[in-house]
Image (cartoon, helix red, strand yellow):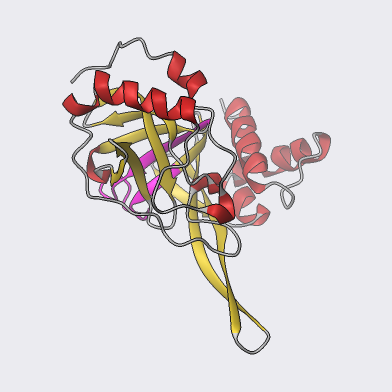
Amino acid sequence: MRFKTFVLAFILLAFSVSNSRGQNLQTDSLLYSEAAAQAIDYFNTAIANDSEIYNGAVYEFYPPANKGSFYFQDKNYCIPGLVRYNGNWYKNIPMLYDIYNDVMVSTLNKNLFILNTEKISDVYLLNHHFTYINGQSQDNLTPGFYDVIYSGRSQVLIKRTKFINEHVVGSEVAETFYEDKSNAYIKKGNKYYLVDNKGSFLDTFKDKKKDLNRYMKNNKIDYKKDKEDAVAKLAAYYDSINN
């Protein structure tokens, strides 16, 4: 199926999602506003039943935690995204990203299901570009979805993960926290390098180390305060001076 040209522009406006989220995670219904539900119904009627995308395993929400969730940006509801699936592009696919299980989830006829990971190459969701690396093309990276935050001559990928922490309050009560963790990888040449601090970043681009240190100082780039922003800006600067 080729890139869809159905006129669904209004869906982007219609997907105004209900503010009920976070701790009020519901397992029996999707947290859509009425307008969003109407938009999904239109999408289902127009193309979904004929789409190769809709053949994944059933998905169920996880129980709520005292803090956080399993989902990207803690959005536990589907919003429209762009997907490249089996080589074809699909617009306005209702999706959410379960980071803990590293799967993309969609909905059809009010049922949640998991998109077939092996057939996904790219997902654009919530102003982020996720690419799936299967481990065969990049044998030094764990298979999964990576957030592409910079792509030029070099490339910066963020691997986002979630982990569960249980905090005991008093003698009996335990609180469950779903917490975020991320690792940055820089592609230089044909290999990706793990960047876990400023030193490892500068070691990756050691041929321009002095230039990068000067650039950070002159532009007041704080690596500790915002690692992702710093790595993306520095990689872009490296590409601009590495002619």
Horizontally, is 177 left or right of 96 in the view?
Answer: right
In the depicted structure, whether residue 50 falls above or below residue 29:
above
Q: Which residues are magenta?
A: 127-146
Residue at 55% from the left image edge and 48% from the top image edge = 74
- The percent position of residue 85, horizontal first and vertical second, equals 26, 31
Horizontally, is 10 left or right of 238 in the view?
Answer: left
Query: Which corner quadrant holds the C terminus?
Result: top right
- The percent position of residue 153, horizontal first and vertical second, equals 49, 30
- In the picture, residue 215 is in which quadrant? top right
Residue at 39% from the left image edge and 54% from the top image edge = 61
Residue 195 makes an appearance in the image: no
Residue 237 makes an appearance in the image: yes
- The percent position of residue 59, horizontal first and vertical second, equals 30, 51
- In the picture, residue 49 is in which quadrant? top left
Residue 101 is inside the magenta segment: no
Query: Which corner quadrant holds the N terminus?
Result: top left
